[in-house]
Image (cartoon, rainbow, N blue to C red):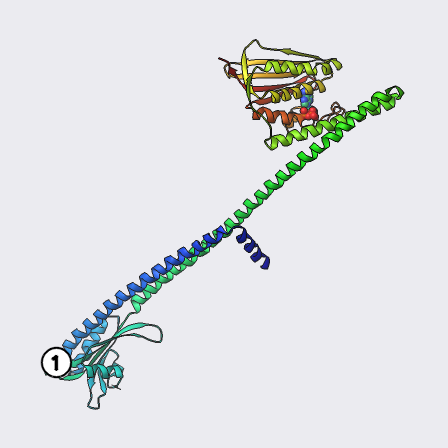
């Protein structure tokens, strides 16, 4: 519980805006409730007034009747019973006769058991002596309110003979008001509880937002770390490769064939490591959007020819034919030349790596109707299964077969190629048959130079 409160405190400290919402959420229903409370109170005042008038009217009617009937209690009693029956809100009607000792005896009453009882209540004495009608709002011990109206009675000779007292209950309007107020009270509590639940829910949402912000930060820190670490690894690896080459050159005449094989393996490993570092750096550049992809309208044939020229020695070394077959056209594509070079280098380099004999052909093709420029790299290499093709463009994916076991690589080249192609508005596809060969195709939107 303590921890829960602490968490809430920390949260409010971090998001002070929430206090404002909290105040609003409590204040609005509270204001609405007080508004209905005030309306109910003013409504009650009017009702009181109406009931007072009603009590006075009944009393005047009865007093007029009593003017001549004071000596006939039987008739008075019947009249009272009749009026009581018609007015359910009338709680009590009493007719008092004045006695010489200045007390009052009950002559008739809506409660017949009272008849004959004496009373010298101060209110009765006061009304009688002042010769004035007195209306008092009374509240009994159950909290029920009623109007008590006392009126002095006169006979035809204008002599004071007694008093008429009636009690008109306000129970009914009070109950309606109480129900209305209770209703708004529950609505207010409901609104506050609902809003608090919403706030709690949003608090969690805010926490998620904070959490995802943190995750983004951590992710950025991770990326920065990878970038820094790989960058720092680059120069020691370059040193190792440089010194290894120099050392090999100096002692090559004294090495046995086994030692030469060892040297060769060390330098291959060092090259793989350098390639891996370069690829990881490239992945982090792509992910952080730190790549310059500024496009340029160009004819890809020049770049293809350049990459072929660069990789021709490697193909020759393996006894492979590396050739180009260009379509006769003058169309262009809008890409970054350096990145296109990088993609083509990777595809042609792979074709050489994964082909034992035969040829690698780079072709260009125009699909005028679809407005597409196609560049394909086709080899007669080891090919790959349909299952392997599904994962081919995933990060670090390498096909593990006996044939690929000795071929160095990072499993990042195709992922990088796909990312770069797509970021430049193109697509990359593969078609392949195991033992027959593979064909990688780059597709870019066609641009016609005017
Ligand atoms: P690597 O550095 O391993 O070559 P890539 O991402 O370039 O990484 O390629 C992923 C995997 O796809 C390779 O390990 C290889 O198994 C397979 N591959 C790529 N190009 C070819 C190809 N032309 N012929 C057969 N397999 C290929």
Residue at 40% x, 55% y is 28
Residue found farthest to the left: 157
The x and y percentages for residue 364 are 59, 13
Query: In the displayed structure, would residue 113 be above or below residue 449?
Result: below
Residue at 14% x, 77% y is 65
The x and y percentages for residue 202 are 50, 49
Look at the numbered disc 1 and say if its residue's Cβ is closer than 8 Å to ligand 1. no
Q: Is 432 on the left-hand or right-hand side of 187?
A: right
Q: Quadrant of ligand 1?
A: top right
When asked about the image quadrant of residue 97, the answer is bottom left
The x and y percentages for residue 140 are 33, 75
The x and y percentages for residue 35 are 34, 59
Does the rendering let one see residue 63? yes
Residue at 33% x, 72% y is 144
Which residue is under mark 1? Answer: 68
Q: Is 1 on the left-hand or right-hand side of 320?
A: left
Does the rendering let one see residue 384? no
Query: In the displayed structure, would residue 233 be above or below residue 83?
Result: above
How dense is the environment of label 1, judged by Cα within 10 Å: few (below 14), some, or many (20 and up)?
few
Residue at 34% x, 60% y is 36
Residue at disc 1, secondary structure: helix
When asked about the image quadrant of residue 365, the answer is top right
Residue found farthest to the top: 328
Which residue is nearer to you in this view: 226 or 28?
226
Q: Is 207 on the left-hand or right-hand side of 154?
A: right
């Amino acid at each position: 519980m303590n921890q829960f409160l602490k968490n809430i405190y920390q949260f409010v400290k971090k998001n002070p805006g929430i206090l404002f919402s909290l105040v609003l959420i409590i204040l609005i229903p509270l204001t609405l409730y007080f508004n209905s409370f005030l309306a109910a109170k003013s409504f009650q005042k009017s009702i009181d007034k109406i009931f007072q008038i009603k009590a006075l009217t009944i009393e005047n009617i009865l007093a007029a009747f009593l003017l001549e009937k004071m000596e006939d209690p039987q008739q008075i009693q019947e009249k009272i019973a009749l009026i009581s029956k018609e007015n359910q809100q009338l709680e009590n009607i009493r007719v008092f006769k004045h006695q010489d000792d200045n007390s009052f005896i009950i002559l008739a009453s809506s409660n017949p058991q009272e008849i004959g009882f004496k009373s010298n209540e101060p209110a009765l004495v006061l009304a009688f002596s002042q010769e004035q009608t007195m209306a008092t709002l009374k509240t009994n011990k159950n909290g029920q309110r009623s109007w008590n109206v006392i009126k002095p009675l006169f006979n035809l000779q204008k002599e004071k003979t007694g008093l008429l007292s009636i009690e008109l209950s306000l129970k009914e309007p009070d109950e309606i008001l109480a129900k209305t107020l209770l209703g708004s009270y529950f609505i207010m509590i409901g609104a506050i509880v609902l809003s608090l639940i919403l706030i709690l829910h949003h608090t969690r949402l805010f926490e998620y937002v904070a959490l995802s912000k943190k995750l983004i930060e951590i992710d950025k820190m991770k990326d920065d770390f990878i970038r820094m670490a790989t960058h720092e690894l680059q120069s020691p690896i370059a040193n190792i490769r440089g010194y290894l080459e120099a050392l090999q050159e100096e002692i090559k005449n004294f090495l046995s064939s086994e030692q030469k094989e060892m040297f060769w393996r060390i330098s291959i490993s060092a090259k793989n490591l350098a390639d891996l570092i370069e690829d990881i750096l490239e992945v982090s550049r792509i992910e952080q959007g730190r790549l310059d992809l500024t496009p340029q309208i160009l004819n890809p044939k020049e770049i293809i020819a350049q990459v072929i020229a660069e990789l021709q020695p490697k193909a020759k070394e393996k006894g492979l034919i590396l050739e180009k077959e260009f379509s006769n056209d003058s169309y262009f594509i809008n890409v970054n030349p350096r990145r296109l070079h990088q993609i083509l280098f990777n595809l042609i380099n792979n074709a050489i790596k994964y082909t034992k004999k035969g040829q690698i052909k780079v072709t260009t093709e125009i699909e005028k109707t679809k407005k597409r420029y196609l560049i394909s790299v086709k080899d007669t290499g080891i090919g790959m299964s349909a299952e392997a093709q599904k994962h081919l463009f995933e990060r670090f994916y390498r096909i593990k077969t006996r044939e690929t076991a000795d071929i160095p690589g990072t499993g990042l080249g195709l992922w990088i190629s796909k990312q770069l192609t797509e970021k430049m508005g193109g697509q990359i596809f593969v078609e392949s048959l195991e033992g027959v060969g593979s064909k990688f195709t780059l597709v870019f939107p066609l641009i016609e130079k005017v």
